[in-house]
Image: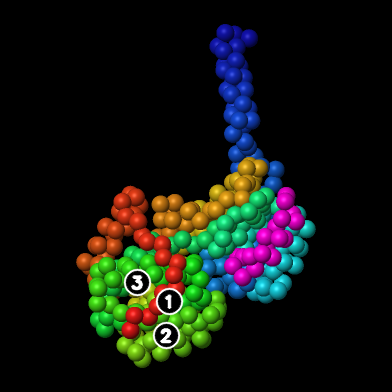
């Protein structure tokens, strides 16, 4: 062996040892995992519903990368939720994702029975040891920004708002929207209705029609069905959670978007690295983590309002502006 060959062999050996030590210290990279995580999701509504749809999309994205195998159950009744949770845990799922808003105690009790399974649940409450992590769609920041756009766009100074249930997760988005609108137009008034359902487009549509009859020329569509009413009556709507402008061209003025990928990706990484903790992942829905954003149809928006909203967006991302979190039930102001 020549000197150069010996030097090259020694260099490769040293680099190989360094790489091995790095793997020991930092864990295996994703490509070196033996197999993808087994993930299941439980939904009480169809995956077409916007809130659940965002979870579904994030998990499908992780599956497409090869990080997980993904299965799900939709339209699960609250009375069946415990049974489905147990079935997935018994099947050896590494992670179960779902929504515990109407089944808090039952879901937490089931999770405690399967300490080796990680659970990530949408919840109004906190995490619980040993394995119950929580999340929420904290998109009050982009909701405020869409309020700024709507406040300048209304000509009647009446905005109608249709929500699902008056729970903190919905209330804070609607209150933020109202504050954003008032920040640019102190004369705006609001009509607020809750349909007491997560998925009833016909009922939401009828509520929206009633608001239009009372003078609303912009509708806040927290639920599906509202934008259909706006389209039929030729007025504008504000979207929530997902961007539906492609389905309602010329109707959707702006939308506050939720991106579940930052949350799902962090949980998958934690479970895969045996570092999962029962934590509150809600912060990863904030705009600064890429969990929220807003989009505007610039052909419909007031240019000055759009400029102001963009400036406020930058201040939010720079940590210089904080949108209030108001969980109280919003009320009509006229």
Residue 191 in view here: yes
Disc with the residue nearer the chain's start (3 vs 1): 3
Side (left or right) of 237 relative to 92: left
Residue 277 — which label?
Answer: none
Q: Which residue in the protein does label 2 denote?
A: 208
Labelled pair 3, 1 in contact (Cβ < 8 Å): no
Label 1 Cα crowd, 10 Å radius (few <14 / some 14-19 / many 20+): many
Could you tell me how many numbered marks the image carries? 3
From this viewpoint, which residue is outermost toward the front?
A: 328
From this viewpoint, which residue is outermost toward the right?
A: 90
Rendering coords of residue 241 (x, y %): 46, 67
Rendering coords of residue 186 (x, y %): 25, 73
Q: Is residue 246 magenta?
A: no
Labelled pair 1, 2 in contact (Cβ < 8 Å): yes
Q: Which residue in the protein does label 3 denote?
A: 178
Disc 3 on helix, strand or loop?
helix
Residue 221 — which label?
Answer: 1
Rendering coords of residue 126 (x, y %): 57, 57
Q: Which residue is at a point 55% across and 79% down the rendered structure image?
A: 197
Magenta-tinted stretch: 99-116
Q: Does the magenta stretch include residue 111?
A: yes
From this viewpoint, which residue is outermost toward the bottom?
A: 213
């Amino acid at each position: 062996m020549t000197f150069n060959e010996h030097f090259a062999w020694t260099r490769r050996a040293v680099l190989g040892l360094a790489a091995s030590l790095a793997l020991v210290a930092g864990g295996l990279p994703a490509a070196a995992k033996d197999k993808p995580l087994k993930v299941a999701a439980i939904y009480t509504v169809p995956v077409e519903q916007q809130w659940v749809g965002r979870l579904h999309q994030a998990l499908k994205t992780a599956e497409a990368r090869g990080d997980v195998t993904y299965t799900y159950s939709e339209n699960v009744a609250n009375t069946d939720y415990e049974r489905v949770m147990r079935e997935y845990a018994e099947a050896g799922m590494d992670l179960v994702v779902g929504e515990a808003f109407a089944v808090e105690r039952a879901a937490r009790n089931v999770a405690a029975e399967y300490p080796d399974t990680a659970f990530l649940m949408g919840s109004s409450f906190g995490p619980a040891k040993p394995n119950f992590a929580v999340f929420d769609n904290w998109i009050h920041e982009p909701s405020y920004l869409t309020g700024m756009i709507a406040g300048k766009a209304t000509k009647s100074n009446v905005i109608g708002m249709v929500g699902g249930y008056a729970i903190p997760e919905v209330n804070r988005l609607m209150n933020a929207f109202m504050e954003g609108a008032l920040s640019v137009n102190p004369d705006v008034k609001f009509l607020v209705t809750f349909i007491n359902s997560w998925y009833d487009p016909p009922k939401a549509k009828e509520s929206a029609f009633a608001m239009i009859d009372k003078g609303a020329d912009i509708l806040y569509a927290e639920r599906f069905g509202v934008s259909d009413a706006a389209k039929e009556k030729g007025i504008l709507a504000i979207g929530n959670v997902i961007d539906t402008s492609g389905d309602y061209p010329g109707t959707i003025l702006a939308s506050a978007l939720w991106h579940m990928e930052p949350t799902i990706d962090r949980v998958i990484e934690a479970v895969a690295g045996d570092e999962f903790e029962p934590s509150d992942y809600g912060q990863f829905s904030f705009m600064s983590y890429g969990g929220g954003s807003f989009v505007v149809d610039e052909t419909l928006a007031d240019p000055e309002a759009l400029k102001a909203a963009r400036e406020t967006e930058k201040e939010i991302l720079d940590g210089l502006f904080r949108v209030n979190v108001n969980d109280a039930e919003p009320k009509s102001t006229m």
